[in-house]
Amino acid sequence: MAGGSLLVAVLAFVLVGGATTLYLRTIRLPREETVAGIAALAGMRWRDFIHLVLDALHKRGYERVFDTEATSDESDYMLERNGQRWLLSSKHGAAYVLGSTAIAEFANNIRMRGADGGLLVTPGQFAPEAARLAAAQRIELLDGTRLWPELRPLLPEAQRVAVSQPALANMKRFFALAWVGALAFAVVLYALSAHDAPAPAASAPTTAATPATPATPADVAGAPGAAPAAPATRDGVAVLPAPTDPAQLEQRRQEATRAISTLAHVDRALWSTQSTLLVYLADPDGDPMADICPLLEHYDELRASRIQLQPPPGSTRPVRFLQCRSY
């Protein structure tokens, strides 16, 4: 059992540590790197940022078109792909949250420039309602979360390392904490399993077979399920020993009252107290004691009960209190 508990603890250690590491590496680390990358993009000069975006769009198949009618200080760029023209505009800065107003203004600019659609980029974010409006105007929205995976490979190696290094350092600490936590969980699990495991049963000593000893009458009487012992005889009357079960005691008391209620000269019988049997007489001149006593003396616990003989209504005979046997 100890080996089983140890195996469970080792499996728990590997599963918990491995699952946490997988989460940190595949979900948490890319998220941390994206946040750091967006901050790096927002910290660039606008011209460096837009040229990085142009390089990424060039990989998609967009080619820059030099518009001779555009002024030299114009910040938008005209691009062409598959014979269609696309207007590129950027809002530089991570604090931007562009909504429907920015989309409407850019859509109007697209129509004025005669483009077929547009690309609106920002290291910031777009409001939830912007996506639906942009799709209706053939505008592709590129925020920091979507831009970073495309722009990251275009950064110089030194800049990529500078962006990723803090996130990697944080993840290393998280990895260590994850495996320490997995180890602590495994130790607790092992301790609980070892504590709850049943102790090995002691092997019974082997003894030589001995001849069976005949059971004595006392052994038979005390064995569970054995037939009750024969009643003892007291004063010439068979007496059943008193049981220890309260339900059996009550059953014997009821048996006695039912038997007495069937006697001649008796109307009915009931127990008024634990030790007093109330007998209602049907015949004022009758004396049923000779028949009542054998029925009570048959039970060891009832043989000394107090008997109250109650005359029938209208009788002038007094109530009598009698007893078959003394204690």
Image (tube, helix red, strand yellow):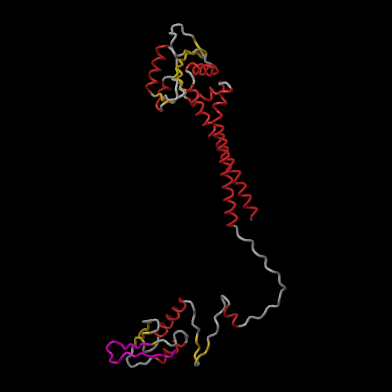
Residue in the image at 67% along x and 65% along y: 203
Q: Outermost residue, right direction? A: 208
Above or below, comparing residue 304 to residue 81 in the picture: below
Residue 257 horizontal side relative to residue 313, left or right: right
Above or below, comparing residue 193 to residue 205 in the picture: above
The location of residue 38, given as percent across then percent down, is: 49, 26
The location of residue 153, given as percent across then percent down, is: 57, 22
The location of residue 132, given as percent across then percent down, is: 41, 25
Q: Quadrant of the N terminus?
A: bottom right
Q: Quadrant of the C terminus?
A: bottom left
Q: Could you tell me if residue 159 is visible in this image? A: yes
Q: Quadrant of residue 322?
A: bottom left
Q: Outermost residue, top direction? A: 68
Q: Indicate yes or no whether the magenta region holds residue 315.
A: yes
What is the magenta segment's predominant secondary structure?
loop
* Highlighted magenta segment, given as a residue range: 307-327
113 vs 170, nearest the viewer: 170
The location of residue 155, given as percent across then percent down, is: 56, 21
Q: How many marks?
A: 0
Q: Quadrant of residue 107?
A: top left
Q: Could you tell me if residue 295 is visible in this image? A: no
Q: Quadrant of residue 307?
A: bottom left
Q: Indicate yes or no whether the magenta region holds residue 113.
A: no
Residue in the image at 49% along x and 13% along y: 79
Residue in the image at 55% along x and 36% along y: 24
Above or below, comparing residue 318 to residue 217 in the picture: below
Residue in the image at 57% along x and 51% along y: 189
